[in-house]
């Protein structure tokens, strides 16, 4: 595409002679001489029209990008708000969990410590086994 030898380029080279108003220094048979027969004002108008079209497309692209950035900004605002709410909820849940853990530890200490807790768990397992035997026999 760029600088490969052997390929024909679709683009014509532009020389400074193309924009010159002085036609006396050009040869009649050269390609630039044929282009110089077209009035310079006409060529500059064509170039300006092409530039205007390019700038119009660039302006439209910039406008689309601006609208997209506003939509992205709005969406990020919503997501930040949701993240803040979720963080507040997680903080509250963490505080509640700490409270429950502390209360459970106090209850275990009040009821006789770890021995009573082991006894309660053993009795619960025995109750589950008995329930299982009753239902399936």
Image (cartoon, grey):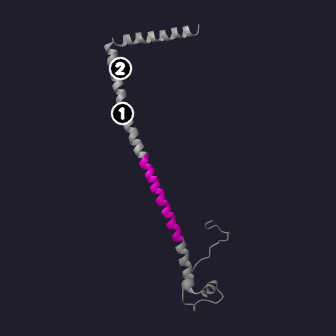
x then y, percent, for residue 24: 57, 92
x then y, percent, for residue 95: 34, 30
**Residue 104: numbered disc:** 2
Apparent side of residue 33 relative to residue 92 in the rendered image (left or right):
right
Location of the N terminus by quadrant is bottom right
Judge whether 39 appears above or below 109 on screen: below
Q: Residue furthest bottom?
A: 24
Apparent side of residue 91 relative to residue 5 in the rendered image (left or right):
left
Kindly state the secondary structure of the residue where label 2 is placed: helix
Location of the C terminus by quadrant is top right
Identity of the residue drawn at 43% across and 53% down: 73
- The magenta segment: 54-78
Q: Nearer the viewer, residue 74 or 52?
A: 74
The quadrant in which residue 97 appears is top left
Judge whether 106 appears above or below 86 on screen: above
Apparent side of residue 8 relative to residue 52 in the rendered image (left or right):
right
Residue annotated with mark 1:
92
Q: Nearer the viewer, residue 104 or 115?
A: 104
Question: Between disc 1 and disc 2, whose residue precedes?
Answer: 1
Apparent side of residue 115 relative to residue 1 in the rendered image (left or right):
left
x then y, percent, for residue 20: 54, 86
Q: Nearer the viewer, residue 86 or 25?
A: 86
Residue 17, visible in the rendered structure: no
**Residue 41: numbered disc:** none
Kindly state the secondary structure of the residue where label 1 is placed: helix
The quadrant in which residue 17 appears is bottom right
Q: CA distance from mark 1 to mark 2?
A: 18 Å
């Amino acid at each position: 595409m760029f600088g490969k030898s052997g390929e024909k380029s679709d683009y014509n080279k532009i020389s400074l002679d193309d924009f010159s108003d002085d036609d006396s220094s050009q040869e009649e048979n050269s390609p630039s001489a044929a282009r110089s027969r077209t009035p310079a004002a006409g060529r500059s108008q064509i170039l300006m029209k092409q530039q205007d079209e390019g700038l119009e497309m660039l302006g439209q692209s910039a406008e689309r990008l601006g609208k997209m950035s506003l939509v992205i900004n709005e969406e990020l605002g919503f997501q930040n708000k949701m993240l803040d709410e979720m963080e507040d909820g997680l903080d509250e849940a963490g505080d509640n969990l700490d409270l429950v853990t502390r209360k459970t530890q106090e209850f275990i200490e009040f009821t006789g410590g770890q021995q009573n807790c082991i006894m309660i768990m053993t009795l619960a397992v025995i109750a589950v086994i008995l329930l299982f035997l009753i239902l399936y026999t």
